[in-house]
Each structure stands twice: as structure tokens, then as C-alpha cells.
Amino acid sequence: IYKRLANCSGRDELDRIQEELVDRFGPLPEPSRALIETHRLRVASRPLGISRIDASPEAVLLHFVARPPIEPAAIIAFLQSRRDARLAGPDRLRIATATADLAQRVARVHEILRALTP
């Protein structure tokens, strides 16, 4: 199952695997839901050139590939529109945001990815 999740390239594939797991094992426990949400974030961040996401209760740190496909102007506009965002090196973007639990962190990261998407 881990390999199938890692090879998913879209939301539809992830949804099918999640449905299969629920059909096979019943309601998913929190760690399983977290695993699927992690892969949803991976799929959503790939077109932006994000290679890694670190989401803690205090901040979200996005690591970009060497030459991300996202326009630099989009990142600058994002930085100018948010007081909580700043560059954290040549390939990282840090957004200071307080989140209490996993669901809030996932929602916040999705919100950030939507804001960066042209």
C-alpha cells in the first residue's frame, strides 16, 4: 500500500486507494488518515516545484527544487500579501502560522498551496 501511495500522481488515485482501504478495513485510524493527507499534499505541491513540506505547530516551511516551475513573481506577490511569510534561504519559504493539530496544519498548507498556484 505504501508503494501504491508513493506512486500516485493525482487526487483521483489517492481517493480510490482510500476507498479501497475503507472497504477492506473499515474507518481509517488517525495515522492512516494522516498518511493519505501527506500524499495529498505531495501531489498538490509537486506542480509548484515544492520538494518538501515541514509543518510544525508554529510554522510551515516549503522547500523548493533548484529551478521550480513557479514564477518568481508569484512568490513575490505571495510574500507581499502576507505579513507572516518570508524567505528562509534561496530555496525555502517560511510561513509563521499557529496550528493546534494535524487537521489544522493540513488545511493551512492546502491554503498556502492554493495561494501560490497561478
Image: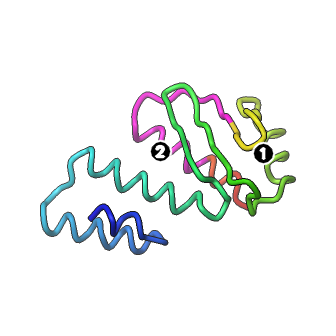
The magenta stretch spans residue 68 = no
Where's the C terminus, which quadrant? bottom right
User: Looking at numbered disc 1 in the image, what kind of residue is underneath it?
Assistant: Phe
Instruction: Indicate left or right for 72 with 45 as reference.
Output: right
**Label whose residue precedes the other's in the sequence (1 or 2):** 1
Q: For mark 2, does the 10 Å Cα neighbourhood hold few (<14), some (14 to 19), or many (20 or more) residues?
A: some
Residue 45's place in the image compared with 34, above or below, is below
Instruction: Indicate left or right for 45 with 27 as reference.
Output: right
Q: CA distance from mark 1 to mark 2?
A: 19 Å
Which residue is painted at 74% across and 58% down in the image? 68
Residue 65's place in the image compared with 76, above or below, is below
Magenta residues (range): 94-111
Q: Position of residue 57 (x, y in %)?
A: 49, 27
- Asked where in the image residue 102 lies, by quadrant, the reply is top left
Instruction: Indicate left or right for 39 with 116 as reference.
Output: left
Which residue is painted at 82% across and 59% down in the image? 71
Q: Nearer the viewer, residue 3 or 55?
A: 3
Which residue is painted at 21% across and 54% down in the image? 28
Residue 26's place in the image compared with 89, above or below, is below
Q: Which mark is residue 78?
A: 1
Residue 75's place in the image compared with 102, above or below, is below
Residue topped by disc 2: 106
User: Looking at numbered disc 2 in the image, what kind of residue is underneath it?
Assistant: Val
